Each structure stands twice: as structure tokens, then as C-alpha cells.
Amino acid sequence: MPSARPSLTLTLLQAREAAMAFFRPSLNQHGLTEQQWRIIRILRQCGEMEIHQLASQACILKPSMTGVLSRMERDGVVRRWRSPQDQRRVYVGLTERGQQCFVSMSEDMERNYQRILEQFGAEKLDQLLALLDDLKQIKP
């Protein structure tokens, strides 16, 4: 009987958990969930965008995105608005408080990246990120 192939999806999940172990304490300290931090980071990097684009980039299902954004809007971190030209299109962007949240988290997050670099190495991390970008491009 042939031996089982290593599971790509399980290995990716385990690697994600290993990486997130560096970042979760900072997120917990700032009272943010992983999903909220992904949203803040994407909006900071890309600017305001339609909710469906944000959901896709943040890997958050649309029904979950609605609840996450409602809580973030309640907390004054993001704001949502409808397009004046097309009321079906809903946009989201960071508020000033959301921008400040990103800035206050940045130092901690950079420190965590440095800890990963110390253990994993810059060259290996660059290779890994390039390979993962390649993997994201393949289509079923």
C-alpha cells in the first residue's frame, strides 16, 4: 500500500498557527480579533473599498464580514457608506480611530516579525512568501 501524501492544507494550517502564535498576544492585548486586524491592515494598506472586495482579500465569508464590520463600526474603527451612484454598493474605510489603532499596533507587530526573522531567517521568509504567492495564483 502506498504511503499517504503529506497534507498540503493541514501543513498550511499548522504553519499559520505557528506564525499566529507570535501575533495573538499582541492582538489580545489590544482587544482585537484576527479578523479585525486583517480588516484594519488591508484597509490601511489599500484604502477604502467595497465590502465584497474586502471580504475576499481578508478571507472572511460575507455573512461573517457583516457581523465583524458591525462590531468594528460600533467601536468607531471603521465606517460604512453606500455609493451615491449605486445604492447596492457598500464601501468601508478606516476612521481616524482605526488609523490610530493600526499605528499603535505597528510597533508590536514589527517586533513579532523580527522574532520570526531571527528564528526562520529573512531569505527563507522571502522564499516562503514568494512560493505562497505562486500557490495563490493556481486555479482549480
Image (cartoon, rainbow, N blue to C red):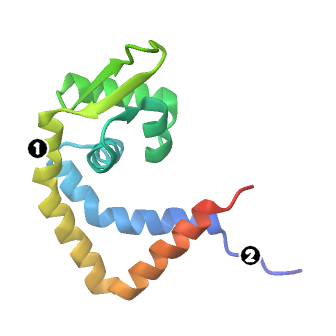
50 vs 134: above or below: above
Q: Is residue 28 left or right of residue 8?
A: left
**Residue 46's x, y, as percent?**
33, 47
Q: Nearer the viewer, residue 67 or 130?
A: 130
**Residue 112's x, y, as percent?**
22, 69
Q: Quadrant of residue 6?
A: bottom right
Residue at horizontal 18 percent and vertical 32 percent from the top: 95
Q: How many marks?
A: 2
Q: Is residue 129 left or right of residue 69?
A: right
Residue 5 is tagged as 2
Q: Report, in whole angstroms, how far the alpha carbon at label 2 lies from the one at label 1.
A: 46 Å
Find numbered disc 1 in the image and state the secondary structure of the residue it sits on: helix
Q: Nearer the viewer, residue 97 or 3?
A: 97
**Residue 76's x, y, as percent?**
17, 27
Three-letter code, disc 1: Gln
Q: Nearer the viewer, mark 2 or mark 1?
A: 1
> Dot 1 corresponds to which residue?
100
Neighbours of disc 1 within 10 Å: few (<14), some (14-19), many (20+): few
Q: Residue furthest front?
A: 85
Residue at horizontal 26 percent and vertical 71 percent from the top: 113
Specify the quadrant that holds the N terminus.
bottom right
Three-letter code, disc 2: Arg
Q: Residue furthest right?
A: 1
Find numbered disc 2 in the image and state the secondary structure of the residue it sits on: loop
Residue at horizontal 47 percent and vertical 77 percent from the top: 128
Q: Nearer the viewer, residue 20 or 121?
A: 121
**Residue 88's x, y, as percent?**
48, 15
Tell whether label 1 touches label 2 (CB within 8 Å): no
Residue at horizontal 62 percent and vertical 61 percent from the top: 137
